[in-house]
């Protein structure tokens, strides 16, 4: 759980296509956005759009813990971001990382190293997908 929550913090940098947020934004699907944030987001992401928005509106070019503060304020753009609040264990970690940037950066580093050390599947033990969304 710690690795999942820490690595989700990578969403503090980068962009996302508006089509990944429009269902929540215009269809009132859960989890909902904070109302003032939704207003700003609607200006940048009309219902049909190829626009992109920053995953973190506050510090879009900085790897920091503001992502977690945004999630706690219902400003996480992706459903997976806001879903971190659905369990007590992950919510507790979000709250800890939101309060302590050093703790987040230390854990992010450990989790990224751990992820990088995972050996790839070889032979018949796995599959390299030609399209990440579909089984070959």
Image (cartoon, rainbow, N blue to C red):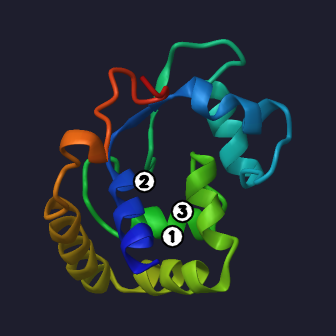
Q: Which residue is mark 3?
A: 70
Quarter-of-image position of residue 126: top left
- Tell which circle, 2 or 1, labels the residue nearer the N-terminal end: 2
Q: Earlier in the sequence, mark 2 or mark 3?
A: 2
Tell me, yes or no, whether the two marked residues, 2 and 3, touch with CB atoms within 8 Å.
yes
- The answer to whether the residues at label 2 and label 1 have Cβ atoms under 8 Å apart is yes
Q: 115 left or right of 16? A: left
Pick the front one: 3 or 8: 3
Q: Is residue 115 left or right of residue 24?
A: left
Count up the numbered dots.
3
Q: CA distance from mark 3 to mark 1?
A: 4 Å
Q: Which mark is residue 58?
A: 2
Residue 44 visible in the shown view: no
Residue lying furthest right: 28
- Label 1 secondary element: helix
Q: Is residue 57 left or right of residue 65?
A: right
Q: Quadrant of residue 9?
A: bottom left
**Residue 40 location, x and y as percent?**
64, 37
Name the residue carrying label 1: 69
Q: Helix or strand or loop: what does disc 3 sit on? A: helix
Q: Are marks 3 and 1 in contact (CB under 8 Å)?
A: yes
Report x, y in % for residue 89.
58, 85
């Amino acid at each position: 759980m710690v690795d999942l929550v820490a690595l989700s913090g990578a969403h503090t940098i980068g962009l996302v296509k508006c089509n990944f947020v429009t269902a929540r934004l215009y269809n009132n699907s859960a989890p909902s956005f904070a109302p003032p944030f939704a207003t700003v987001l609607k200006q940048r992401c009309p219902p049909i759009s190829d626009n992109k928005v920053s995953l973190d509106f506050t510090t879009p070019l900085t790897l920091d813990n503001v992502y977690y503060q945004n999630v706690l304020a219902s400003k996480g753009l992706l459903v997976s971001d806001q879903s971190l609040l659905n369990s007590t264990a992950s919510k507790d970690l979000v709250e800890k990382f939101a309060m302590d940037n050093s703790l987040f950066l230390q854990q992010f580093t450990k989790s990224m190293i751990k992820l990088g050390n995972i050996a790839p599947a070889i032979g018949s033990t796995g599959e390299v997908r030609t399209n990440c969304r579909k089984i070959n």
